[in-house]
Image (cartoon, rainbow, N blue to C red):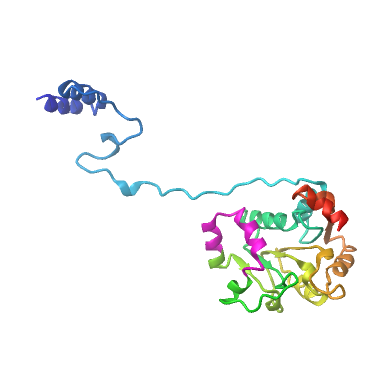
Amino acid sequence: MGKRSAVRRIRNAEFDTQAYFDDEAMTNGRNLYAIDGGWTPEDEPRGRAPNTKSKEPQREQRYVKNVKPRSDGQAKLMKAIDEHHLICALGPAGTGKTYLAITKAVEALQKGEVGRIVLARPAVEAGEQIGFLPGAMEDKLAPYLRPLYDALSDRLSPKQLKEMLAEGVIEIAPIGFMRGRTLNNAFVVVDEAQNCTYTQLKMLLTRLGWHSTMVVTGDPAQSDLLPELSGLRDVADKLETNPEIAVIRLQAEDVVRHPLVAQMLDTL
């Protein structure tokens, strides 16, 4: 009778759950208590089981980071990307050229300012030949584009990055296949441009289309080509005279890696 009276009291009291637990505790001699946030009869219509399918799916982890410049040179680079459509970022290793370019590319994509990101990087090894690589074009280029992937992974979740690569929102564009294309509504990042010849850079720069931004990064002092073949220094010197094009030259004081990196750049 104790349980029936408890159920009757719940119905008369419009689902007074506290009355049910108090009466049940007296009947069974046990200490019962309600847990906040659990299911209650008010959550579902009478006579129906709880609808477990109505729960919202687990939210995807969001990568939201506010990137701030850590040197005057980096501040000039970020401002130049905001104000110009063609930017050349020259400087030694560790100055954040690639990372800042990728950061601005992801921000422009998320804001809807561009429709895709195009990544280009010369397939040139650093002093050694590793032979032919198996797989499709993306697989062959993956080792060369690993620095760009690392920067993208720091701005996007693995799921987002995988989906965008599959859908072509983030595109891998081999330099050898860029001739004849027009890159409209895109944010283009040309990394390690010191390993491009003058002819290759001229071809890449003329791919720029409407509503697009192109950032060319590289260090003329670390070219894996013969000095007379690398065209980045000559291209940057000629473009610097155009006020519509930003040429940012980062220095050793802009290095954000280990302090020894800046010291080695001064001595080696």
Residue at image point 70% right, 65% down: 188
In the rendered image, which quarter is residue 183 located in?
bottom right
Name the spot of residue 67 as percent of width and height, x first: 69, 47
Residue at image point 61% right, 74% down: 140
Dominant secondary structure of the magenta stretch?
A: helix
Q: Is residue 212 left or right of residue 25?
A: right
Name the spot of residue 145 as percent of width and height, x first: 65, 66
Foreground residue, 229 or 169?
229
Q: In the rendered structure, which segment of residues is drawn in magenta?
A: 142-164
Q: Quadrant of the C terminus?
A: bottom right
Residue 183 appears in the figure: yes
227 over 97 or under it: above or below: below
Q: Quadrant of the N terminus?
A: top left
Given the current orientation, which residue lies at the most extreme left position? 1
Foreground residue, 66 or 110?
66
Residue 76 appears in the figure: no
Q: Is residue 29 left or right of residue 1?
A: right
Number of numbered discs overlaid on the protein picture: 0
Foreground residue, 251 or 170?
251
In the rendered image, which quarter is residue 114 located in?
bottom right
Residue at image point 21% right, 39% down: 46
Name the spot of residue 146 as percent of width and height, x first: 64, 64
Residue at image point 66% right, 72% down: 173
Foreground residue, 69 or 139?
139
Name the spot of residue 202 as percent of width and height, x first: 80, 74
Magenta run includes residue 129: no
Magenta run includes residue 154: yes
